[in-house]
Amino acid sequence: MQVFSEKRYWGKSVSPGLGEGIAYVMDALVRERRDGGIWDPVVQKERFYQARERFCRQIRQQVKLLEENICIKDVEILLLQQALAMDTGTDQQICSLLDQGCRAEAAVDQVWTKLRNCVQDRSEDFEDVRLGLLHALGGSQSYGFLEVLPEKTVLIAKDLSPAMVSHLRPQNVTAVLCEEGGILSHGAILIRAMGIPCIMHVPEILTVPSGTDMLCDASAGRIIAAPRSASRVCFYKSAHRLPMQDDTKETLAFHGKPIQILCNISSAAEAEAGIRQGAEGVGLLRTEFLWASGIPDEEMQFLEFKKAASCLAEGRPLCIRALDPSGDKTPDIYTGQRGIRYCLTHREQFQIQLHAVLRAAAEYSCIQLLLPMVTDTDEIEQTRQLLQICREDLIRRGYRNLPMLSVGVMIETPAAVLIADRLAAAADFFSIGSGDLTQYIMACSRSKEGENLYAALPVLRAIRHVATAAKNAGIPCHFCGEAAGDPHMPGLLLSYGITSFSVCPPMIPRLRWELSRIQEKQRQGSKSAVDEKFIKTY
C-alpha cells in the first residue's frame, strides 16, 4: 500500500478553530442516468409525488435537528429548498415531460439542471433539490451517512452545501476542508453557525487519502496531512488559538472612538448565543423565519421581538430587519420583489410587522428598524408614513408610549451606493450588507466568490464612499456580514471610519481578537495599526 507522506495545504479560513483527526474524503456524487424508453405517465407521476414528499419530510427533520441540537433557528435555507421543491411552476414542467413518456428520474434531472444553470447565484440550492429528489426516487447518494461519521473525523469534500452541513454532527466532525466554496456561501454561513472549523478553496485537498492523519488550523487556513512528530509539535506552538471569552470583554477603541461588535441572528435563542460570545447588541435580526409556517400574526412577531430585546442589556441596540423575501429565502426570485420593494408592495403584511415592532419598541427603547434593499429615498419616506399610520392605529387601540423609531438603511446595491449622500440625509443609520453588495457590484455568485471578491477594488471603493457619506451626514455606519472575518478587513474598515461590526455569533471571538490586536498596536505607539501597504492599494 502506498504511504502518504507529510504534505501541507493552504486555503481560506471560513470558520475559525483548531481541528485534528482522521480524513474522510467524500466521493463525488454520481450524476443520474437518464433512462430511455416510454414510461407510464400515471405511474411516474405517482413516483415523483411520493419522492417529493419524502424529500420534504427529510428537510423538516433536518430543520428540527438544527433547532433542537444547535440552538439556532436560521433554517431559511433549508425551508427555501422545501419551497422550491413544492413550486407549482416546476411541477408543471416535470409533469409535461412525464406526459411525454419520460421516466421520473430523467424529468427531475432535466428540469432541475436547467433551473440550476439559469440561477447561478443560488445554484447550490437548486443542485441540493435536484440531488435530494433523485435520492428520494431511489437513484442518488444521500447525505445521511454524514450523521454517523466516527469521532475525530476531518471531512474533505469538493464543496459544502447547506444540506450537507445539516447532516453534520459537531461532536464527531472536528474540521471540514473543501476544494471549492467561499466565505459568503450558504454552506459556509451554516458551518460557522455550528462552530465547526472550516477551510475552503484548498487546492488539491481531494488528493488526500481517507484515513490520513490531519492537523487543521482553520483560523490561519493552514493544514498538515500525515504530520511527522516534529511538525505536530511546531503546529501546536504556532497555531492560531483564539482567546478565551472571559479575556475578550475589554472595551475596544480606535483613535479614541469606541468599537462596537454586534451579532447577526434569526431568533431570540441566537441573541442569547451572541451575548455569550461577547456581542454588544444585535446588528441584524432577520424576520423571514417567522414566515416558515405561513404569514405570522402581529402577536407572534411582537412576542419574538420582545424576547430578543429582553436578552440585551439596557442601551444595547436591536436592529430588526423588515421582511426580505430574497433569493435565499423564497422561490420567487425572478420578479425583483426584494426587501423594502416587497414590503411596500405587500403593505398589509408590512403594516402587521410594523405594528409588532412599534409595540415591542414601546417596552424596549433599544429597538430600531432596518430596511433592506433600499434604492431610493422615496422608499424611506413611504416607510416613515406607514409607521405614522401604524402608530395612530395602535393609539386608537389603546397603546401608549409608542416611540419614533430609528430607521436605518441597508446598503446592498450599486444604486444605494451611488445615492449614498441622499440616503444618509433621509436615514438614521447605515448598515452595509457586504454579501449582497459584493454580489451585485461584482456580478458574481455568493457561493463562488472564492477569489476574495468582497475585498475587490470596486467593492472597497463602494464601502469607503458609503462610510464617507455617513460620516458627512453625522449618522452611524455598521458593517454587516461575514466578510468582516477576513483578517485584513477590520483594519481596512477602521481606516474608512467604520467602527461598528455585525457578524454571526461564532465569528465574534475571532473578530474581537483581531480588533484587540489592532488596539494593542496603537498602545505600543505604532504609527498605523493597520496594514499601510494594503490601504494604499485602494
Image (cartoon, rainbow, N blue to C red):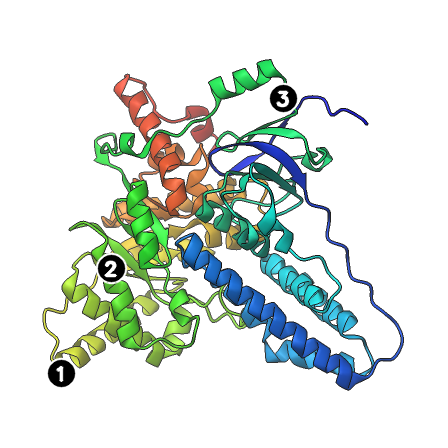
What's the distance in space between the residues labelled 2 and 3, CA to CA? 51 Å
* Rendered image: mark on residue 368: 2
What's the distance in space between the residues labelled 1 and 2, CA to CA? 23 Å
Side (left or right) of 373 relative to 113? left
Height in image: 362 above or below 209? below
Side (left or right) of 499 relative to 65? left
Q: Which residue is mark 3?
A: 227
Quick one: label 1, few (<14), some, or many (20+) residues within 10 Å?
A: few
Residue 451 position, x and y percent, is: 59, 40
* Rendered image: mark on residue 269: none
What's the distance in space between the residues labelled 1 and 3, CA to CA? 71 Å
Q: Can you say which quadrant of the picture contains the N terminus?
A: top right
Residue that sits furthest to the right in the current view: 37
Quick one: label 2, few (<14), some, or many (20+) residues within 10 Å?
A: many
Comparing labels 2 and 3, the label whose residue is closer to the camera: 3
Residue 137 position, x and y percent, is: 72, 69
Secondary structure under the numbered disc 2 in the rendered image: strand
Q: Residue at x 32, y 19 (%)?
A: 527
**Residue type, label 2:** Gln
Side (left or right) of 456 relative to 71? right
Displayed quadrant of residue 492: top left
Q: Residue at x 67, y 30 (%)?
A: 212
Q: Residue at x 41, y 25 (%)?
A: 532
Secondary structure under the numbered disc 3 in the rendered image: loop
Q: Residue at x 58, y 75 (%)?
A: 86
Secondary structure under the numbered disc 1 in the rendered image: helix
Q: CB of mark 1 within 8 Å of CB of mark 3?
A: no
